[in-house]
Amino acid sequence: MTQAQQNNQNIAALLLEQRRYPPSADFAAQANAGEGFYDQDPDTFWENEGRNRLSWFTPFTTLKQWDPPFAKWYLGGKINACYNCVDRHVENGLGAKVAYHWEGENPADRLTITYADLQQRVVKAANAFKHLGIGKGTHVGIYMGMVPELPVTMLALTRIGAPFTVVFGGFSADSLGGRLNDMQCEHLITQDGAWRRGKPNPLKPIADEAMAMAPSVKSCVVLRRAGNEVAMTDGRDHWWSDLVDGQSDDAAACPCEPMDSEDLLFLMYSSGTTGKPKGVVHTTAGYLCGTATTHHYIFDIKPETVYWCAADIGWITGHSYIVFGPLVNAATSVMYESTPDYPDKDRWWDIIERYKVTVLYCAPTAIRTHMKWGPEYAHKHDLSSLKVLGSVGEPINPEAWVWYRDHIGGGRTPVVDTWWQTENGMILVSPLPGLTTLKPGSATKPFIGVQAAVFDNDGKEIPPGEGAGFMVVKGPWPAMLRGLYNDEARYRDVYWSRFENTYLAGDGARVDEDGDFWLMGRIDDVMNVSGHRLSTIEIESALVDHPEVAEAAVTARSDAITGQAVVAYVILKGGKDGSPEKSAELREHVAKVIGPIAKPANIVFTPELPKTRSGKIMRRLLKDVAENRTLGDTTTLADASVVDEIAQRAKLEADKEG
Ligand code: PRX
């Protein structure tokens, strides 16, 4: 791109950013969040939500306890997540309401699951799990695709009080094994394979490798889904159908275990700035209340809403906004098994038209992919049922925001850009449809009670309109992480050591004159590729794990579709030169160690890496090279010529890839 073209693009983006979309009077008149919403006292608000949105075996006595950096919410209460998501809705006469319209990859594979069906499935699975010896406090791993049995498994485990960790199906055996070990899981629930573009993507074979590294796992339940060949180990492995199908579905005979508000619900592993993923701890009552409350107001959920979050349950978005939040609210959701382009690029729009979806929640990467394919795929379908569009996972560029609203939302629908993180459990910053004036590219306002702010280097709050700094939260919120599993020191260090009693999010941000937040991406060694969080150090460790790699440095560059893309600089042992074959081999190696999502988009072979005199790799410079930017300060560099050399090689690499 020439400089003039770049300038024109910047100007166009700026003009889009300056557009304003006040709520329509029609929408505002019926919105869940009415005028005066933000004027409520936050503690009273969360107290009422806790009492009214959730059902308790024993009501809580104290709203919250804040002993920084540790928070507890809804203390003294006894509650069960599964009861709140399933049983009480059936008891309240909503048994015939659809919980999930499940759509398999093969368009002929469809299931309508009502709340009564869901209860039966959950009870049967819970009975089967009990039969295996799973009970209150047993740790269980889950490694599945987007099949109905995945939420069923999560709910069945919460029913009997067993905490779990779901590992995304795109992670490798090493990643799965590491998580099973860290949580000391005694059981693993998986499936033979998941459908991906007409082919089975094997899961059980990977689970086998993972279990070989995780001796705590005593049994494995395998759902037949894709029909691929799998080995079953006698005494350890059981087919789901053999265990579950014959069980009783009598809910009264399999009661929901009363849990403490602060009992562990699940762990979600997330990449940080070191090689080892962090086990983010989420507990029961605050998490349920935080996710369901934000879901209700931010997506304007009504009894007739048909809601679709197109994320994968293997990530926090799926936990909070496909499973727990929507089910607590007795919402009707769509759940889709596979990719947006199977069998064709209009699959999403076909689904929306068929189920008359009213709310769509997805990642900017998906929106940009649809932009690239062209709006004609959407235009073939009647999308007039849509009322609210949501975005999550990465900053949404104003161009994609406006395209989303115009081509998918017919120029009518509010777009809610929701900022939050695995650690947050629930959305923290977002517009409220019908209330907030929208700005393309801005997540706008903190949710009620969320003390979000932007701090400068010295921990002083930067006033609105006065520049960018660190995104922080000054106090606790209901669904916040309660710690990192078995690692209090890291919990304190990562989130609470930079500023006193203040949560450091790791994102850059600014607040404009109107008090609206603009999130600007990570400021640490964490990348965000297609809305998935990846750690530079984790990928570097995967690369140096290859026998021929001497050193590696990883950074991110911007990418028009995936937001960011991984660029790796690699020194081969013995000063060997790289080749396209070696590059392919290393990419596969990263896929094997971490998972295909972590494969570098580009690998640049280099004889040296830029280091400070103390030997620290200067990633900032590598980022400049990757972004093709004018190089930043090189004065602390041990050998400044290294960067020029790398820049030249990177350019050659880029030219080769066209
Ligand atoms: O950088 C922010 C980005 O995603 C990171 C959190 O990633 P993860 O824990 O995987 O959770 C993703 C789904 C909640 C954040 O630190 N991020 C998420 N949402 C937004 C965002 N950046 C800008 N705008 C958003 N709406």
Image: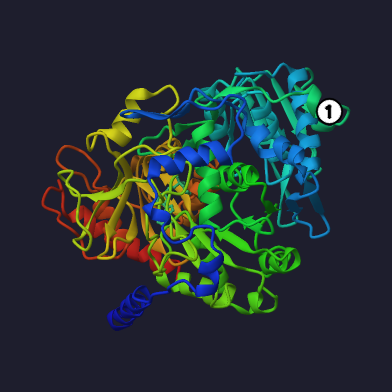
Q: Horizontally, is 109 left or right of 493 in the view?
A: right
* Residue 413 in sight here: no
Give the total number of marks visible in the rendering: 1
Q: Quadrant of the N terminus?
A: bottom left
Which percent across, then down, holds residue 496? 28, 34
Badge 1 residue CB within 8 Å of ligand 1: no
Residue that badge 1 annotates: 250
Residue at horizontal 50 percent and vertical 74 percent from the top: 25
Residue nearest the observer in this picture, 438 or 136:
438
Image quarter for residue 253? top right
In the image, taking residue 83 as reference, residue 364 lies left or right, namely left
| In the image, residue 456 above or below residue 33 | above
Q: Nearer the viewer, residue 607 or 19?
A: 19
The picture places residue 457, in percent across and down from the top left corner, at 17, 46
Within 10 Å of disc 1 (Cα), the crowding (few <14, some 14-19, many 20+) is few
When asked about the image quadrant of residue 489, the answer is top left
Q: Position of residue 307 (x, y in %)?
A: 64, 57
Q: Is residue 29 shown to the viewer in this render?
A: yes
The type of residue carrying mark 1 is: Asp
Q: What colouring style does the render use?
A: rainbow
* Quarter occupied by the C terminus: bottom left
Q: Is residue 628 left or right of residue 321?
A: left
In the image, farthest residue toward the left = 635
Residue displayed at 61% across by 61% down: 359
Q: Position of residue 252 (x, y in %)?
A: 79, 25
Regarding mark 1 in the picture, which secondary structure is present there? loop
Quadrant of residue 149 in the image? top right
Using the image as rendered, state which of residue 12 and residue 64 is in the foreground.
64
